[in-house]
Image: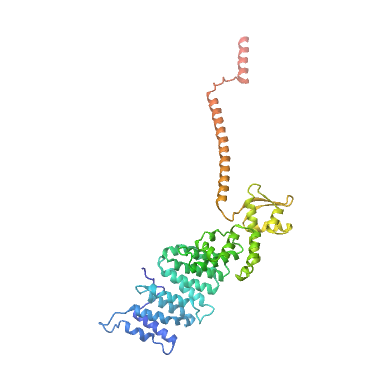
Amino acid sequence: MPGIPNLSLVEGAFEELARELAAYIDTLKGEGSSVSSDITPFLADSAKPDGKPTNKDTVLKKLVTGSSVLNNAPEREVQAAYNLLIHLISQAEEPDMYLPPVCKYLSSPITTSPHNGTGIALGILGTLFNTIQPDDETRYHVLLAIVELVKNSGNFETLQPQLKNLDSWVAEWELEPEDARKLYVAISNTAAASKESADSYTYLLKALRTTQDSPASSEAHSLSLKALHAALQNEKHFDFQDLTALDSIQALRKSEPTWSELLELFSSENYEDLQEFKEVNGSFFSDNKLDEDLLDRKMRLLTLASLAAHASQTRTLPFAQIAKALNIPSVDVEMWVIDCIRSGLVEGKLSQQKQEFLIHRSTYRSFGENQWREVASRLETWKSSLNNVLAVIRQQKEEFAKEKEAEANAPEPQPRNNYRQRLNRNTNAVAVEVE
């Protein structure tokens, strides 16, 4: 495995620098600290040619264990102290075994710098992450620490642009599903802490997909409910097929039938069905912290999208039909149609004169056998229309070719004398007669 490059220009042998860091740790810890004396027996003594070689692993274990105190160092010294520690770790045969605790320390508050501590820690971790080889799994531990720091600072936008590379990083590091899941959940929680609900749901779904080998496990069950709750509570999330396609979500049919039924409602049913669900299940919404008004609104918009999708033949929806299906006054129909258009579920034009909605495009909430048949029917119609157009073009080409052939085979016409030629002949004739 590739080692960690030096993060700063640090001069000196390992033994000298280890003693320097140990002395600094003892100073920070105060009376009773013995890191310096603990590492001395494992350091080579240059004064004794026959002395034992330095046991770097033992020295580093003691230094790393004592380095939790570096977060109490004066603000101006924190970065230099951590750089020295990381420089020493870089000289180990297996540096990745020492970095996880260091990353954990940096995820904790730097007590001497309440205002700049997060920035200092992110600077150290960011430099460390960028200098480790891209395919080195050590990067995983550094990234986890960065995510935790960003979560505590509530500054998700600083991390967001870098996450476009996350899937390629996970592939390069060849993470086990458990480790990948831990990372995705951490990012999801960080996004949620910054009120970035769309990003939070995206990474929660990635975490859930890592459980598909054991869809009935307790962790899969917990993540499934969390993802379902997040999808329902996100006012801009209308497509639930990303959930229904997962085995862990399907496993809720047995373990959580009420949640599963609610998901089916939002996947394919209408507003009236949701009201029946609420009557049967009493306080289910309040018990599970579901916003009833938000869910009613989402279901009305989804119901309108379904009406538009099913009106594929006439391509129009009367206002009266919309009002009845959504259980709203007729005067509110236009407002709901406009909201549905803004949500991206339908496209079309309102006609106040005809009291109808002319549909240009509609969204299918679920895409099954019936929808595939409709697509096949439309494709067949388009195919027939294109064949007709092609036949007309061929006929025109044939007629044009025949005209060209007829022109080519026609006899060449005799040249006609123009007025000036006839005039010249007449003048010559007169002249001859005079002579």
Q: Residue 205 placed where, x, y %?
A: 52, 64
Compared to residue 189, the image places residue 242 above or below, namely above
* Quarter-of-image position of residue 226: bottom right
Q: Specify whether 42 is left or right of 152.
A: left
Residue 13 appears in the figure: no
Q: Residue 337 placed where, x, y %?
A: 67, 56
Quadrant containing the N terminus is bottom left
Compared to residue 51, the image places residue 154 above or below, namely above
- Foreground residue among 149 and 379: 379
* Quarter-of-image position of residue 402: top right
Quadrant containing the C terminus is top right
**Residue displayed at 41% across by 68% down:** 137
**Residue displayed at 39% across by 74% down:** 97
**Residue displayed at 37% across by 85% down:** 36
Residue 181 appears in the figure: yes
* Quarter-of-image position of residue 274: bottom right
Question: Quick one: which residue is furthest to the left in this view?
Answer: 50
Q: Specify whether 409 is left or right of 46.
A: right
Q: Specify whether 136 is left or right of 249.
A: left
Q: Residue 287 placed where, x, y %?
A: 61, 71
Q: Specify whether 271 is left or right of 135.
A: right
Compared to residue 415, the image places residue 291 above or below, namely below
- Foreground residue among 258 and 373: 258
